Amino acid sequence: MSNLMQQEGPDQIWIQPMEAEDSGLAEPQLFEENDDWYAGLFNAYFLSIFKKESGGIPQESAEGFSNLKPLLDAYFDDGSLSEIHRQVCNRWYSEQQQSGIWFSVSWKDFQYEDSRGRALGFYYSAEEEVFLQLGADGALVRTGLPLKKPGFACLFFRDETGAYRMFQQSPQPGFWSAELFPFVHKADDAFHSKEFFKLCKSFSEDVLLKEQHKSREEQIGFLADSLSYTKEKQEVSFDEFRTEVLKEPSLIDAFDQYREDYSDRKQWNPPDKFAVSSAVQNQAGKFIRSVIKLDKNFHIYVHGSKERIEKGFDDEKKLNYYTLWFDAEN
C-alpha cells in the first residue's frame, strides 16, 4: 500500500464523463458523500496506485504548463478547483478524444512526510466492467467503473519549502510531464540542500533508530549536529560531513550505503560539495526537529543540542525520566 494513504478522505471530487464523439464536455458532477466508508474507498482508489515520486520543479517556461501554473497556484492558495478542472479536462479531451471518466480530486488536509496542506489529483479511466446487481426486484446486469486503479493519474502537493512535488501513474512513461505538466529536476543548491536535510532525517529514522537501535537522544544529536554543521560551513562537503559529524567508521559506512540507496530512489545526484541555501536551511530547522513521545502523556519537541537533555531511570518510582536544561521560558 502506498505511503501516501490518508486518514481523511477527499473534500471535493469532480466527476467528468467523456465521450469519444466531438460533442463537447458535459457538466461535471460533484460527488458530495463524505463519511468514513467513502473516505477509505476513495483514498484506496486514488492514492494506493502511486509507488514513487516523479517530476521535480515546475518548468514554467514550457509550452503546455504556462497557463496551468497560475491555476495550480490558485488552487493551493484558496482551494479554487473549478477552473483548473475545466482547463485540464478540455486539454485532455481535445488531445485524447477517448470515452471514459475523469476525476479532479482535492484533499484539504493532506499529510506526506513533513508536508501538510492541500493536495490535488487528476485521474482518468477508460475501462468499463460488467457486473451483476442483486436486489429485491431481481438481478440486473449493469456496466460501471472498476475500482481497481485508474489508467492515468497524477497528484500534486506543496512541500515544506513551498515547491511543488508530483506523483504520477501512466501506461506511457513521462506522459503527464510531456502532455500537461512539464517538470524538470532543477539541480541547483536549493534543491540539493533540501534533499540533503531529508536524507539526514530519513537516515536518522531508518538507520539510527530502526536498524542500529540508537536512543532518541543520539538521533536528536545527529540531527542537531547536521544542522549546526551546515550553519557553520554554509555548505555541504560530504567528505567533511563524514569526519566532522558522523566520525565513527561504522556510522560512515552505513551513511554512505544509505545515501547511495536514497539517491537511486529519489533520482538525486548531488555533487560532492555544494552551497547550502539559507531559505531551505531555515525551513529545515523546523521540519528536521525530533519529537520524543512519552507514553500518551507528553510530547517533547526538540530543536537544540543533545547536551541539554538527559534521560534517566528512577529506581524508587520505577519510571523513566528526562532532565532538560534551558536558559529562559519563551
Image (cartoon, grey):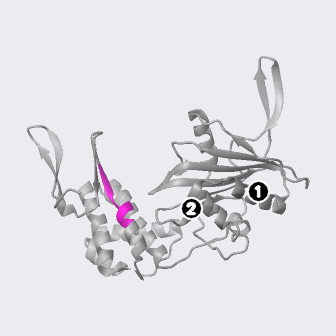
> Left or right: 23 with respect to 88?
right
Q: Is residue 81 above or below residue 179?
A: above
Dot 1: what SS? helix
Rendered image quadrant of residue 97: bottom right
In the picture as drawn, the residue positioned furthest to the left comes out as 316
Q: Position of residue 214 (x, y in %)?
A: 27, 57
Label 2 amino acid?
Glu
CA distance separating discs 1 and 2: 23 Å
- The magenta region covers 284-292
In the picture as drawn, the residue positioned furthest to the top comes out as 136
Q: How many marks?
A: 2
Residue assigned mark 1 = 89
User: Where residue 53 is drawn, which disc sits there?
Assistant: 2
The reply to whether the magenta stretch includes residue 264 is no
Q: Earlier in the sequence, mark 1 or mark 2?
A: 2
Using a 10 Å C-alpha cutoff, classify the residue at mark 2 as few (fewer than 14 neighbours), some (14 to 19) or many (20 or more): some
Using a 10 Å C-alpha cutoff, classify the residue at mark 1 as few (fewer than 14 neighbours), some (14 to 19) or many (20 or more): many
